[in-house]
Structure formats: structure tokens, C-alpha cells
Amino acid sequence: MQTRLLNTKQAADYLSVSAAFLERDRWAGAQIPFVKVGSRAVRYRQADLEEYIEQQVRHSTSEESR
């Protein structure tokens, strides 16, 4: 199994959000899973991003987040 790792900018582009959004998410407790490579590099698995997207699907604007 090959895992595709994306850097913060690539992951932000994939989700159509800013890199700052992902940085805030990591700082606030990471709803979006990430991988630390070495002591500084942050990467996102494409499969985790796809799963996060699926978890965000709503059928009404009044529906609460999971």
C-alpha cells in the first residue's frame, strides 16, 4: 500500500482552505489528522483528508458537527 503524503500547502489546496486554517487546526487540537516526519516536518495523508471530507457531509444547515 502506497501512502501519499502532502505538505501543509498541498493539503490546504486539496481541501480548498488556507494553510493558516490547517496550522490553527493543529494548534487547537487537530480535527484533521497529521503526521510529524522528523522533528519539524508536518505531512497529511491523502486518505485522512478524504475521510475528514466525508465526516463533514451534512444534510441540513442546522445539523451539528460530529
Image (cartoon, rainbow, N blue to C red):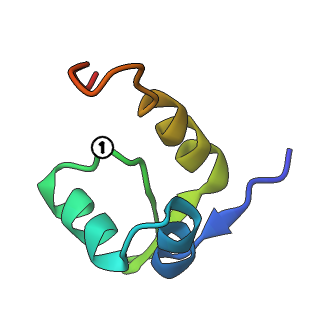
- Where residue 6 sits, quadrant-wise, is bottom right
What quarter of the picture does the N terminus occupy? top right
What quarter of the picture does the C terminus occupy? top left
Does 40 appear above or below 52?
Answer: below
- Where residue 7 sits, quadrant-wise, is bottom right
> For numbered disc 1, what is the local secondary structure?
loop
Image coordinates for residue 28, horizontal then vertical, percent: 13, 55
Furthest residue in direction left, as rendered = 28
The answer to whether residue 5 is left or right of residue 30 is right
Image coordinates for residue 16, horizontal then vertical, percent: 49, 66
The residue shown at (43%, 56%) is 34
The answer to whether residue 29 is left or right of residue 38 is left
Image coordinates for residue 11, horizontal then vertical, percent: 53, 67
Does 64 appear above or below 33?
Answer: above
Furthest residue in direction right, as rendered = 1
Q: Which residue is mark 1?
A: 31
The residue shown at (54%, 49%) is 49
The residue shown at (18%, 49%) is 29
Question: In this view of the protein, which residue sits in the foreground, 37 or 43?
Answer: 43
Question: In this view of the protein, which residue sits in the foreground, 14 or 43?
Answer: 14
> In the rendered picture of this protein, how many numbered marks are placed on residues?
1
Characterize the local packing of mark 1: few (<14), some (14-19) or many (20 or more) Cα atoms within 10 angstroms: few
Image coordinates for residue 20, horizontal then vertical, percent: 27, 77
The answer to whether residue 56 is left or right of residue 45 is left
The answer to whether residue 41 is left or right of residue 66 is right
The amino acid marked with disc number 1 is Gln
The residue shown at (40%, 25%) is 58
